[in-house]
């Protein structure tokens, strides 16, 4: 387990940079945290650190946004609006999680827990203050 403290968006970008060097194709990253904790800010930073130069947006209404960098595919899921797990079958979530050549980043993973792969990187973001966040990262090499 690794623990990081962020006091600003710039520091969150720095945490994303550290984590981007530890993940590889086939990884699934699960992001836990309350509304406003910074899951989307972190995810956008992580996707940029992985090499995406274009506009990175939240898939709040589309459930998933796909990005490609060279041969790497990045799937960014936002499950906040899911009311029933079966809703994700339509987007081919099983195939996306099974693809060992892509990276999956999932916000609100607790809403689709029965679809998640066994070994995932888990990141919990806790609100400590107005701008202060604690990142607890499990499942990556130290």
Image: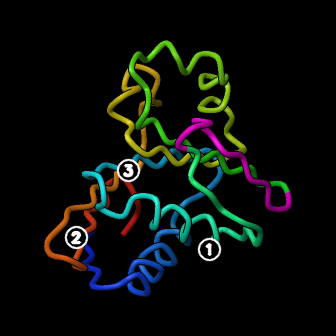
> Where is residue 16 drawn, in percent x and y?
47, 73
Residue 122 lies in the magenta stretch: no
Residue 64 lies in the magenta stretch: yes
Identify residue for label 1.
49
Name the one closer to the observer, 114 or 26.
Answer: 114
N-terminal-most mark, 3 or 2: 3
- Could you give the CA–CA distance between mark 3 and mark 1, rounded to whole angstroms? 17 Å
Q: Quadrant of the N terminus?
A: bottom left
For residue 104, above or below residue 91: below
Q: Which range is magenta?
A: 60-70
N-terminal-most mark, 2 or 1: 1
Tell me the quarter of the picture where residue 61 sits: top right
> Where is residue 3 drawn, in percent x and y?
24, 71
Name the side, left or right, on which 52 lies relative to 9. Answer: right
User: In the image as oriented, which residue stretches furthest toward the left?
Assistant: 128
Identify residue for label 3.
31
């Amino acid at each position: 387990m690794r623990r990081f403290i962020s006091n600003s968006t710039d520091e969150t970008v720095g945490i994303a940079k550290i984590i981007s060097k530890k993940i590889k194709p086939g990884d699934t990253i699960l992001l836990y945290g309350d509304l406003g904790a910074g899951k989307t800010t972190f995810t956008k930073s992580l996707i940029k650190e992985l090499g995406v130069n274009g506009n990175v947006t939240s898939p709040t209404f589309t459930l998933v946004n796909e990005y490609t960098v060279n041969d790497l595919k990045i799937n960014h899921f936002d499950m906040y609006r899911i009311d029933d797990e079966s809703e994700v079958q339509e987007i081919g979530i099983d195939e996306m999680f099974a693809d060992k050549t892509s990276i999956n980043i999932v916000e609100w993973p607790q809403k689709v827990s029965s679809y998640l792969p066994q070994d995932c990187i888990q990141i919990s973001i806790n609100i400590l203050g107005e701008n202060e966040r604690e990142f607890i990262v499990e499942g990556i090499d130290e």
